[in-house]
Image (spheres, rainbow, N blue to C red):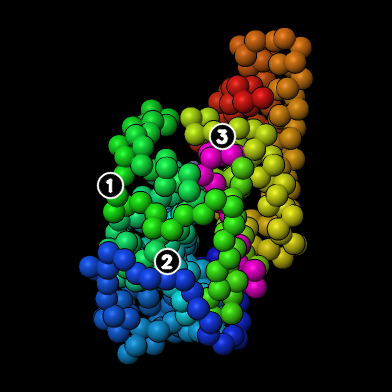
Amino acid sequence: MSYERAACALVCAGVCLLLSAQDASAKKSSSDPQVIAARQKFFGAENVDAKTGQVNNDRVIFSWATNTTYAVSVLGRIILLDSYVTRLEVKPGRTPFVIQDVVDLQPEALFIGHGHFDHADNNKNFRLAGAEVMAHTNTKKRLSQPRDVLGMHFDPAPPNALPTQVFSSTEELHANGETIELGYFSPAHTDTDIYIRYVRSNVLHLGDVFFNGMYPFIDTTTGGNIGGMIAGATKALALADDRTKIVPGHGPVGDRAALTRYRDMLVTVRDRVAKLKKSGRPLQDVLAEKPTADLDPIWAKGFTQPDMLVTIVYNTL
Ligand SMILES: [Zn+2]
């Protein structure tokens, strides 16, 4: 489905969100012409007051920016999911923008789903725009350290690019009648993964615990493992019903049926590789056996190809 501007009509009185803005040197009034233009770009001119910049407060609007970065208006309160926005986005179905457009949205909060660069870049820009940056405590820890993954090296993030609020288990926020739950997965794709659940809107953001329609990448350098991925998908299924819109880390927006198929695929791969490993077969033998051959035409559609997945599964059993 097209996820842009998927409006859920929720009529609610105002309560509160979180926040005490820090570092707000780039903060602008909502009536600033650039803020109005950015909000109209992401949420549609019909949903943004052309004088005040206020976004329609009777609906929740998700606007897909890039990867798993979404601009969201929760009944008029602007937040951002993930912050990977370093390039001009031109992919069909996404809102075309440059980073200044997203900064000009003036989100009051940014939720970081996990610590990889393609989800957590650009925190600094949003802190400068006055947003609180919320993430799991391990995300702050990982971003504070030098990191190497998939042949790429990342220096520690500067202090002004780190999350401003961290949590270890769960957090519950309230915005104009919507309840937003943030919850930690035990190590799955990394040891920084969280889900973000919009309870009334029935939207569940899973980050890279869910690769919709393709084999996942699992980052073993930060605690990722196949058992955690299966446990994460299972936990997410318990949070979803048949109408839940489920936002993956990669791939199109999915639903409970797609997440179930993905979880079942992971279980199948895990069981096959475990059986071979248990029988004493070294990794090279297991790879030669091609234990995912019948699954590959369906699932080997992304970055992670069969040998990579089997190697990760074998090494994390
Ligand atoms: Zn990732």
The dominant secondary structure in magenta is loop
Is 36 one of the magenta-colored residues?
no
Q: In this figure, which residue is indicated by the disc labeled 1?
A: 158
Q: In this figure, which residue is indicated by the disc labeled 3?
A: 224
Say what amino acid the circle numbered 3 marks: Gly
Between residue 18 and residue 105, name the one nearer to us: 18
The spot of residue 197 in percent (x, y) is: 61, 62
The spot of residue 201 in percent (x, y) is: 63, 71
Q: Secondary structure at mark 2?
A: strand
CA gap between label 1 and label 3 equals 25 Å
Crowding at mark 2 (Cα within 10 Å: few <14, some 14-19, many 20+): many
Q: In this figure, which residue is indicated by the disc labeled 2?
A: 109
- Where is residue 128, by image quadrant? bottom left
Could you tell me which residue is drawn at 51 percent across and 44 percent down? 192
The spot of residue 1 in percent (x, y) is: 60, 63
Q: Quadrant of the C terminus?
A: top right
Between residue 228 and residue 62, name the one nearer to us: 228
Q: Are marks 2 and 1 in contact (CB under 8 Å)?
A: no
Q: Secondary structure at mark 1?
A: loop
Say what amino acid the circle numbered 1 marks: Pro
Say what amino acid the circle numbered 2 marks: Ala
Q: Residue 123 vs residue 7: left or right? A: left
Give the vertical position of 178 relative to 259 (above or below).
Answer: below
Between residue 38 and residue 222, name the one nearer to us: 222
